[in-house]
Amino acid sequence: MTHEEARDVLPLYALGVTDTAERAQLEEHLRGCLPCQQVLALESRTVDGLGRSVDQVRPRPELRRRVLGNVRSFVDPDAIPDAGTSAGASRATPWFWAVAAAAVVALVTSIGLVSARRELAEVQAELETSQQRVAQAEERAVRAASEATSQRRVVTVLTSTDLIQATLNGEAPAASARARAFLSASTGTLIFTAYGLPALPAGRVYQLWAIVGTTPVSAGVFTPDADGRSQFIAQLPALDAPPATIAVTLEPAGGVPKPTGPMYLVGAASN
């Protein structure tokens, strides 16, 4: 018996209306399945509470006669003992009707429990789907907010009164590479975009530099995409003077305090 099949049979097992083969299969499954054991305990408590969930009311005599009359209509008259039946058999008849009525109630109740469990599973599935959609919407909102912030920073830099620009050309390792840099000297915000950069060797990154006089100031490391393109916004520390040169070098992963590798891009900065 599979795990899913066991979950469907557990309510019937708790009510005691499973057949012998089904009961044996379920009990074998239960011996090695702690989650199903826990579900069975819950189902058993539910069934146990059914009898106490409503007030006990003695039925009217005419209602009892009508119910028993309806039950008798489904029974073969030849199977019902006549008035001459022994006293022992006569005494057993009420027990038969009680068991039959209990079986009907158990069957109806079990069907209701199985249906309720399936409806609950459907509701849980719908809830999980809704939660996933909410999470996706939140992710899109975060991305949109981040993009809007980046766009505002770009506009601020490009419209600043102290804008510094640089066109970077490729050096020997990357002769066809090109890049542009835009820097707001007062805020230190630098916009950088490049294309045509070669794929990086293992354990290496590109590092961007703003060179003030003879002092290189790191503007961060980056990795281009598969087409050799890269675009990002960097934040420089406070500078003593506007940079005269913008450059890109090849460095170990994580970057270095001062350039150590070959220069791939370089360009003069001007306002």
Image (cartoon, grey):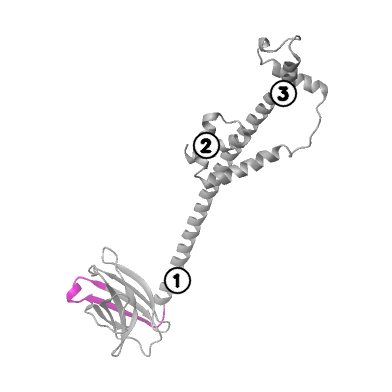
Is residue 166 part of the magenta span, yes or no?
yes
Q: Secondary structure at mark 2?
A: helix
Quarter of the rendering containing residue 91: top right
* Residue 195 image position (x, y, % from top left): 26, 68
Label of residue 111 in the image = none
Q: Decide: is 196 above or below 118.
A: below
- Which contiguous range is marked in magenta? 160-178
The residue identified by callout 3 is 95
Quarter of the rendering containing residue 77: top right
Measuring 43% from the left and 73% from the top, which residue is drawn there? Answer: 153
Mark 1 and 3 residues: CB-CB less than 8 Å, in contact? no
* Residue 193 image position (x, y, % from top left): 31, 71
Q: Gap between marks 2 and 3, in whole Å?
A: 29 Å
In the rendered structure, which amino acid carries the disc numbered 3? Answer: Trp
The residue identified by callout 1 is 152
Mark 2 and 3 residues: CB-CB less than 8 Å, in contact? no
> Can residue 271 be seen by looking at this rendering?
no
Rate crowding at label 1 as few (under 14), some (14 to 19) or many (20 or more) other CA atoms within 10 Å.
few
In the rendered structure, which amino acid carries the disc numbered 2? Answer: Leu
Is residue 219 part of the magenta span, yes or no?
no
Compare marks 1 and 2 and give the one earlier in the sequence. 2
Measuring 71% from the left and 18% from the top, which residue is drawn there? Answer: 70
The residue identified by callout 2 is 26
Compare marks 1 and 3 and give the one earlier in the sequence. 3
Q: Secondary structure at mark 1?
A: helix
Q: Secondary structure at mark 3?
A: helix
Left/right placement of residue 115 relative to residue 85 reads: left
In the rendered structure, which amino acid carries the disc numbered 1? Answer: Arg
Rate crowding at label 2 as few (under 14), some (14 to 19) or many (20 or more) other CA atoms within 10 Å.
many
Left/right placement of residue 147 relative to residue 94 reads: left
Measuring 27% from the left and 72% from the top, which residue is drawn there? Answer: 203
